[in-house]
Image (cartoon, rainbow, N blue to C red):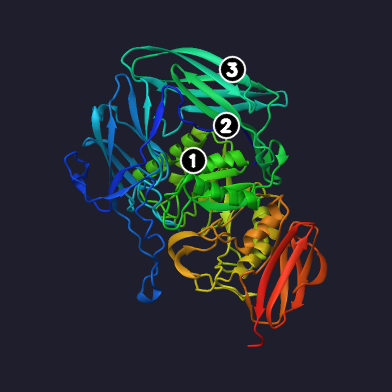
């Protein structure tokens, strides 16, 4: 197989800044968690409904309710069904204007009514979608009624998964007002502007900007399209202008070529440099950032960024969820999660198993974190054309809405299809074809598990990744390396990586040293997770033919399927607890390996009541040596080998203070108590 070379000059959507205006509709909604068919009608009275603001999910309260095995409930039960939202919009429509409702995310099916008229239906829970409501509006008060339903529907992906499908209007809702001639808003929820780098040298970058235009008037319209590329200092570095006459009620595409001299590349964490592209089309305007970069993936050297080897490692992130609020998260919540990953030192994130909020991609662009992002095809499929059509629709939305993010490196076709009946291959083939049609510049990837390594389902994407849990779900830590080497030897032309590896851990469970763990049981000691990651990362980092390695998972998250660890309905494989208050030891292990910022961490800080006098102190650090003291007495310095330094010590009866030091200013401290022989 030949190396894949991708040349990507990419732009991030920003809403029109001139004739188009955006108005938030997040405030003052009424909500009820039941099906009320008459709720779409203007004369229906909803006075008894619950007042809410958006974003809002009706699963915020039951997402963490698990089943009770003693009652024969292996899984939790959370509400999956219909609910209604109503909002009063006061507006005086202007002649010649068009009004578009934008939903950034609503699960899983959505029906929208304006003044009793059905203006649109959407299937899929994770993408932005828009409906033109111009014809349904009147002067004065306008009723917006929305029916959402997160029930399982045979033709809508995902059918299932190791996560909850939160229902509701759980992302922002807004009203966009635009003129009759404007940059198209109806391209699968995308920006209507697509910027691609065609060629790069040290002297110049050749840029192509594709702009989708729409004339919604009854007359022909002359439009001048002007594109400017502006550097980070505000200097215009390239311009292009073209004129076009649009036929009445038409949609046309304008493509323009531009050249950036001596381009500064988007270089991942080292230098995530962004230009700004300003597109003016008549009275409409869209401003987007532009990142210029190249990506190459080879079978032996793995991932190359701008022609240089670039290690792709990081964690999986489920879509952002907060306890008590579910998926109704804020930008600040997302920023916190992304900052936690950035401080750990990730170079990449895999966004599982669906499209994430735009803020995630924005932050990744700014931080220089590469992204793989995937369609919500998980575990199983349904027979029939309707399911395939829906999967393709959601792939189109994913690509249209995220095409321009420089952080997005690969499109994911799906995750862990476990059954061959009905045959999943036509669906995967359709997704691959769709991705290549819409974006030939990027590679595709599929996360494979639970069928033979060489099963046909793993062969549709350009590159493959595998979900492997050696040392957690059976086998031993060492089997990860054995498996990877054997697969590489058997298929030397196959480009593959590891899309998931991980182990559960509860900060309430402390056992040092830990015994073997039964994953489905109620004992998940934090120390075992740390040992798992120490062993697996040392194996994976030594195999350059792996194009990527992703931990499962960044942060603990709700999953109705789970009934293990310290409580049901939680996947505890995260490196950080669900409330974001505690970083587990394994987080610091990766920070020691990946982060540039100097750090030091004594492991097992929560194992405060020691059961034996003689213990091993283990310190994670990215320094050359660490000094230790016990109860104020220096114990000397130890070299840090593979980011670990250890001491064997004897505790005194009662309280013991252990302190670690590195350099002039790094310090960590734990307090352990030994109560004597038990």
Which quarter of the rendering shows the N terminus?
A: top right
Which residue is at a point 44% across and 38% down the rendered structure image? Answer: 397
> Which residue is disc 3 drawn over?
239
Is 103 in front, or is 627?
Answer: 627
Mark 2 / mark 3, whichever is N-terminal:
2
Viewer-closest of 97 and 23: 23
| Number of other residues with Cα within 10 Å of mark 2, as a class: few under 14, some 14 to 19, many 20 or more | many
Residue depicted at 35% across the width and 60% down the height: 78
Residue drawn 70% across the image and 46% down it? 300
Numbered circles on residues, count = 3
Q: Where is residue 282 in the image (x, y as percent from the top left)?
A: 44, 16
How far apart in space, not on screen, are marks 2 and 3 (Cα)? 17 Å
Residue furthest to the bottom: 678
Residues under numbered marks 3 and 1 in contact, where contact means CB atoms less than 8 Å apart: no
Location of residue 67 by image quarter:
bottom left
- Report the Cα–Cα distance between label 3 and label 1: 28 Å
Horizontally, residue 650 falls left or right of residue 56, namely right
Q: Quadrant of the C terminus?
A: bottom right
467 displayed left or right of 380: right
Lower position in the chain sequence, tag 1 or tag 2:
2
Q: What element carries label 3?
A: strand
Label 2 secondary element: strand
Sequence-wise, the earlier of marks 3 and 1 is: 3
Residue 136 vertical position relative to residue 459 in the rendered view, above or below: above
Residue 210 in percent (x, y) is at 51, 24
Residue at image mark 2: 10
Which residue is denoted by mark 1 in the rendering? 358
Q: Position of residue 581 (x, y in %)?
A: 55, 60
- Asked whether, in this view, residue 81 is left or right of residue 420, the answer is left
Is any atom of residue 150 visible in this view? yes
| Residue shown at 53% from the left, 29% from the top | 288
């Amino acid at each position: 197989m030949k190396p894949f070379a991708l040349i990507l000059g990419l732009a991030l959507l920003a809403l029109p800044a001139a004739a188009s205006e955006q108005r938030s509709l997040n405030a003052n909604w009424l909500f009820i968690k039941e099906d009320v068919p008459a709720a779409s009608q203007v004369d229906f009275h909803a006075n008894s409904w619950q007042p809410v603001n958006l974003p809002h999910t009706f699963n915020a309260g039951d997402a963490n309710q698990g089943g009770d095995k003693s009652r024969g409930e292996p899984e939790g039960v959370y509400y999956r069904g219909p609910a209604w939202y109503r909002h009063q919009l006061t507006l005086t429509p202007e002649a010649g204007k068009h009004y578009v409702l934008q939903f950034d995310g609503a699960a899983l099916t959505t029906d929208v009514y304006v003044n009793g008229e059905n203006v649109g239906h959407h299937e899929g829970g994770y993408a932005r979608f828009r409906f033109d409501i111009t014809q349904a509006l009147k002067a004065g008060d306008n009723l917006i009624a929305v029916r959402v339903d997160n029930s399982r529907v045979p033709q809508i992906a995902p059918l299932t998964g190791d996560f909850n499908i939160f229902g509701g209007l759980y992302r922002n809702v807004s009203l966009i007002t635009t003129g009759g001639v404007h940059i198209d808003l109806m391209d699968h929820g995308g920006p209507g502007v697509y910027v691609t780098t065609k060629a790069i040298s040290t002297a110049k970058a050749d840029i192509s900007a594709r702009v989708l235009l729409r004339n919604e008037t009854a007359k022909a319209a002359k439009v001048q399209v002007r594109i400017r590329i502006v550097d980070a200092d505000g200097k215009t570095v390239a311009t292009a202008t073209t004129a076009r006459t649009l036929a009445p009620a038409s949609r046309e595409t304008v493509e323009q070529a531009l050249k950036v001299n001596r381009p500064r590349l988007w270089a991942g964490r080292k230098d995530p440099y962004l230009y700004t592209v300003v597109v003016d089309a008549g009275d409409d305007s869209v401003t987007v950032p532009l990142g210029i970069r190249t990506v190459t993936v080879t079978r032996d050297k793995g991932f190359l960024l701008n022609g240089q080897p670039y290690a792709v490692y990081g964690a999986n992130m489920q879509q952002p969820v907060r306890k008590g609020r579910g998926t109704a998260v804020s930008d600040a919540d997302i920023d916190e999660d992304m900052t936690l990953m950035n401080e750990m030192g990730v170079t990449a994130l895999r966004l599982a198993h669906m499209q994430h909020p735009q803020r995630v991609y924005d932050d990744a662009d700014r931080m220089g974190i590469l992204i793989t992002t995937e369609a919500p095809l998980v575990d199983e499929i349904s027979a029939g054309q309707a399911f395939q059509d829906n999967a393709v629709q959601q792939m189109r939305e994913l690509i249209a809405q995220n095409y321009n993010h420089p952080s997005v490196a690969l499109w994911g076709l799906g995750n862990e299809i476990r059954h061959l009946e009905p045959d999943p291959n036509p669906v995967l083939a359709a997704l691959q074809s769709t991705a290549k049609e819409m974006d030939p510049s990027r590679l595709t990837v599929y996360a494979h598990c639970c069928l033979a390594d060489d099963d046909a389902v793993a062969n549709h994407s350009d590159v493959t990744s595998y979900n492997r849990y050696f040392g957690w779900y059976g086998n031993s830590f060492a089997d990860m390396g054995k498996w990877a080497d054997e697969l590489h030897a058997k298929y030397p032309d196959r480009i593959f990586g590891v899309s998931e590896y991980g182990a559960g851990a509860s900060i309430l469970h402390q056992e040092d040293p830990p015994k073997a763990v039964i994953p489905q049981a109620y004992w998940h000691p934090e120390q075992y997770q740390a040992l798992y990651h120490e062993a697996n990362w040392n194996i994976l980092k030594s195999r350059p033919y792996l194009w990527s390695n992703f931990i499962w998972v960044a942060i603990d998250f709700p999953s109705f399927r789970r009934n293990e660890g310290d409580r049901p309905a939680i996947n505890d494989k995260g490196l950080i607890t669900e409330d974001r208050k505690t970083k587990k030891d394994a987080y610091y292990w990766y920070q020691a390996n990946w982060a540039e910022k100097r750090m030091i961490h004594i492991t097992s800080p929560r194992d405060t009541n020691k059961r034996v006098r003689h213990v091993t102190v283990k310190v994670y650090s990215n320094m050359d040596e660490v000094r230790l003291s016990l109860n104020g007495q220096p114990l000397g310095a130890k070299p840090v080998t593979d980011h670990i330094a250890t001491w064997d010590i004897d505790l005194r009866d009662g309280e013991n203070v252990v302190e670690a030091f590195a350099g002039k200013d790094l310090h960590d401290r734990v307090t352990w108590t030994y109560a004597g022989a038990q």
